[in-house]
Image (tube, helix red, strand yellow):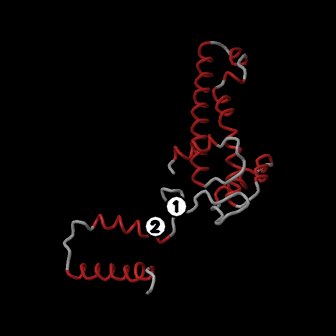
Amino acid sequence: MGPFTDITTVFVKTFKFSGRASRSKYWWYTLFYNVIIMVCGFVDVAMIIDLLQQEDKAAIEALSIFDYTSTFAWILTIPPVISLTVRRLHDAGFSGFWALLFFIPLGIFALLVMHMLPSRSGTSVHGTPASGPVADRTGKPMTVDSHKRAMQGYAVLFDKDKPVTAEMQAARKAEVADYYRSRVLKASPSA
């Protein structure tokens, strides 16, 4: 998955606290979140500077919390952060309740370390790893053998312009004969 897919997936799963979220998904959204908050902070600072230049301090004191763009950015981006934090903790092998460390002084640093930990392999009570096995076009997990064969098919494309030598022909004939003996003759019923 790419960064845009990861970010949109986080927004789609805003109110889903079950399941798992990979490290890449967490860190792409964290980058997106921080950029949005910084841009909104710069817009708010520019608004305050503009008010200071045009009027006095009374105009700034008259502003409500909803006059700042960063307020709306936080309202829109905090719910996905909370659910993503819980799902990332699940992926690292922790309970989602560890997210409450945010409310303890210096607990955010413990959460930061927990978010950096790699995904737990295998299936847990929270589901399969977010970066699970590669699936084929039907959605079934690809075995290592089928993945290897697919990669060999791509390798053939790079060798298509090479001249065929007698050794290469003999090796290919031996490979086909071996395949025929192991797969075709073995599967046919004996008389």
Q: Amino acid at mark 2?
A: His
Dot 1 falls on a residue whose secondary structure is: loop
**Position of 44 compared to 181: left or right?**
right
**Position of 180 compared to 26: left or right?**
left
Q: Which residue is at the front of the view, 187 or 38?
A: 187
Q: Which residue is at the front of the view, 49 or 22?
A: 22
Q: Which residue is at the front of the view, 150 or 122?
A: 150
Q: Locate residue 101, reporting x and y percent.
A: 78, 51
Q: Residue furthest top?
A: 55
- Above/below status of 124 relative to 166: above
- Above/below status of 15 relative to 51: below
Sooner in the amino-acid sequence: mark 2 or mark 1 = 1
Q: Locate residue 178, reporting x and y percent.
A: 36, 83
For the point 57% across and 39% down, the residue is: 35
Res 51 → quadrant: top right
Q: Locate residue 176, reporting x and y percent.
A: 33, 78
**Position of 45 compared to 102: left or right?**
left
What's the distance in space between the residues labelled 2 and 1, CA to CA? 8 Å
For the point 38% across and 83% down, the residue is: 181
Res 9 → quadrant: top right
Q: Quadrant of the C terminus?
A: bottom left
- Above/below status of 64 relative to 153: above
Whether label 2 touches label 1, CB < 8 Å: yes
Dot 2 falls on a residue whose secondary structure is: helix
Is the residue marked by circle 2 packed among few (<14), some (14-19), or many (20+) residues within 10 Å? some
* Residue indicated by mark 2: 147
Q: Which residue is at the front of the view, 46 or 123?
A: 123
* Residue indicated by mark 1: 134
Numbered marks: total: 2
Q: Amino acid at mark 1?
A: Val
Q: Residue furthest front?
A: 191
